[in-house]
């Protein structure tokens, strides 16, 4: 074998190894993005289930009872979570605007919702109060930023 032949084979082998490493890095990066999306989605889903269960507990406890809930993760500038109680179809909607993406989770409320209410959590306001009120013999639950 000539001296130049070994160098050419070596360069070819190094090129193949580098291409393989580049593909592995690309796959790892894309999987990391998918894992982060799954994490945000899972946290919002758990948060919406917690809000739904808390609405039922507050409703059952009656007038004046309130519970404080906080954001499932710290919110950065430009990010937010909107929580809506919808009386038309008795649903609880949680909309998260996280990292430039919008995630929506809708839960059916186990108790009647008599009045629409909505709160937006952001970097400055990271807590929400779920409060039971009674008016005219009807107990209803609303969501607000303070008790």
Image (spheres, rainbow, N blue to C red):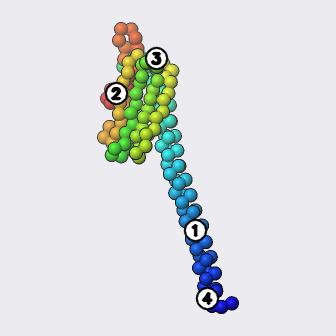
Q: Are marks 3 and 2 in contact (CB under 8 Å)?
A: no
Crowd around label 1: few <14 · some 14–19 · many ≥20 (10 Å): few
Label 2 SS: strand
User: Which of the two discs, 3 and 2, labels the residue nearer the N terminus?
Assistant: 3
Q: Name the residue under label 2.
A: 144
User: Which of the two discs, 2 and 4, labels the residue nearer the N terminus?
Assistant: 4
Using residue 94 as the reference point, say whether residue 22 is left or right of it: right
Placement of 25 over or under 87, stated as above or below: below
Q: Which of marks 1 and 2 is in front?
A: 1
Using residue 46 as the reference point, say whether residue 13 is left or right of it: right
- Residue 3 in the image: x percent, y percent? 63, 91
Give the Cα separation between the discs numbered 1 and 3.
59 Å
- Residue 26 in the image: x percent, y percent? 54, 60
Q: In which quarter of the image is the C terminus?
A: top left
Give the Cα separation between the discs numbered 3 and 4.
82 Å
Q: Which of 25 and 107 is in front in this view?
A: 25
Q: Mark 4 points at which residue?
A: 4
Q: Mark 1 points at which residue?
A: 19
Crowd around label 2: few <14 · some 14–19 · many ≥20 (10 Å): some
Using residue 110 as the reference point, say whether residue 10 is left or right of it: right
Q: Are marks 3 and 4 in contact (CB under 8 Å)?
A: no
Q: Name the residue under label 3.
A: 112
Q: Nearer the viewer, mark 2 or mark 4?
A: 4
Q: Which of 56 and 3 is in front in this view?
A: 3
Q: Which residue is drawn at 46% across and 35% down?
A: 104
Q: Which of 35 and 62 is in front in this view?
A: 35
- Residue 124 in the image: x percent, y percent? 30, 40
Q: Are marks 1 and 2 in contact (CB under 8 Å)?
A: no
């Amino acid at each position: 074998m000539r001296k130049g032949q070994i160098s050419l084979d070596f360069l070819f082998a190094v090129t193949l190894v580098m291409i393989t490493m580049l593909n592995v890095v690309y796959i790892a990066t894309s999987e990391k993005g998918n894992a982060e999306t799954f994490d945000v989605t899972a946290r919002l889903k758990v948060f919406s289930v917690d809000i739904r269960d808390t609405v039922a507990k507050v409703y059952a406890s009656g007038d004046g009872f309130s519970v404080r809930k906080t954001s499932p993760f710290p919110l950065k500038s430009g990010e937010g979570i909107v929580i809506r109680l919808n009386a038309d179809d008795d649903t609880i909607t949680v909309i998260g605007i996280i990292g430039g993406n919008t995630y929506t989770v809708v839960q059916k409320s186990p108790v009647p919702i008599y009045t629409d209410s909505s709160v937006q959590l952001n970097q400055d306001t990271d807590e929400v109060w779920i409060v039971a009120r009674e008016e005219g013999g009807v107990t209803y639950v609303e969501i607000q930023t303070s008790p």
